[in-house]
Image: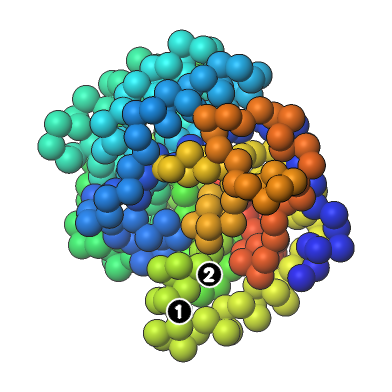
Amino acid sequence: MHLNGNGLSRRTIDVLQVNMGRYCNQACIHCHVEAGPTRKEMMSRDIVAAVVRFLAGSKIPTLDITGGAPELHPHFDDLVESAAALGRHVTDRCNLTVIFEPGKNYLPEFFRRHRVEVVGSLPCYSEENVDRQRGKGTFDLSIRALQILNQLGYGRPDSGLILNLVYNPVGPHLPPPQEQLEQDYKRILNERFGIVFNRLYCLSNMPITRYAMHLKLRGEYDRYMRLLESNFNAATVEQLMCRNLISVGWDGSVYDCDFNQMLDRPIADSAGRRLDIASLTLDHLGAPAIAVGDHCYACTAGSGSSCGGALVA
């Protein structure tokens, strides 16, 4: 692994990413969380409270909430409100269709009231491609959700309400250049649906869990791994999100990133005990090296990939 020789280490943590659980109203092919309507793993109220205590005791400026569909968690609103009250910037990784679930139509206004940055999944501007990856009817619901957010000011200049979109390749290949694809998204979505947004994030599909199984069933796993490895870009290493982010699982365990979380590779102390958000201090994160593996090629191939999109131009 090319990364092993780089002594990959943490810098100042400026993002606390919290995975509230694996329950979701969708079951996407590329989902590394293996989320879906039948998943039962959900963060307890006590762990949500521990997350808030940790955030309050730190100077970490951003809370990044993910899932599953985190908005379906019974204490999602409490977490957002608590973080906003602490003056932290809150990001919600939203599948967009969740606002049409029973009892969730208040979410767009809730986001606006708390100035939540919405990062919405829209893996293509083509209905065919989106529905193939995420389920029939998903594209239409996503477009309706974006139009509702736009009506509240999201994605519009000078509103301060940030709306970013996420692109994932439909097949086992690298994303195209992010800046060019963003221009295409903005032009096509505006021309067809009157939609505006701030940024497009291009993410590589992570070859683990559900997506790895999908690739293996199609006989494409080895080819995709060779593609990622052969396109390793050392320039991305400096910008890897695991260097300034920590990830908290639904059970309170702490990880270098959401991908290591799904592979159950927690951050451990010197005695090999996994760190837990209820007792975590930032001092605990100074010694352990960041755990890397072959899956890290997905973050370091080509222009790189992170929760904030491409890492290098």
User: In the rendered structure, which disc, 1 or 2, sits on the residue that comes first in sequence?
Assistant: 2
- Check contact, mark 1 vs mark 2: CB within 8 A: yes
Q: Residue at x 34, y 21 (%)?
A: 78
**Would residue 191 be seen by someone viewing this image from the given angle?**
no
Say which quadrant the N terminus sits in. Answer: bottom right
Q: Is residue 243 left or right of residue 50?
A: right
Which color scheme does this rendered protein use?
rainbow
Location of residue 93 by image quarter: top left
SS at badge 2: loop
Q: Position of residue 219 (x, y in %)?
A: 46, 88
At 57% from the left edge and 78% from the top edge, which residue is drawn? 224
Indicate the position of residue 270 as horizontal and vertical percent values. Answer: 74, 46
Q: Nearer the viewer, residue 74 or 195?
A: 74
Report the disc number at residue 66. none
Residue 261 visible in the snapshot: yes
The residue lying furthest to the front in this view is 271
Residue 271 vs residue 189: left or right?
right
- At 41% across and 85% down in the image, what residue appears? 218
Task: Name the residue rendered at 28%, 21% in the picture.
Answer: 109
Q: Nearer the viewer, residue 18 or 237?
A: 18
Q: Secondary structure at mark 1?
A: helix
Q: Tag 2: Cα neighbours inside 10 Å, few (<14), some, or many (≥20)?
A: many
Q: Which residue is mark 2?
A: 207
Q: Amino acid at mark 2?
A: Pro
Looking at numbered disc 1 in the image, what kind of residue is underneath it? Answer: Leu
Residue position marked by numbered label 1 in the rendering:
215
Q: Is residue 85 above or below residue 98?
A: above
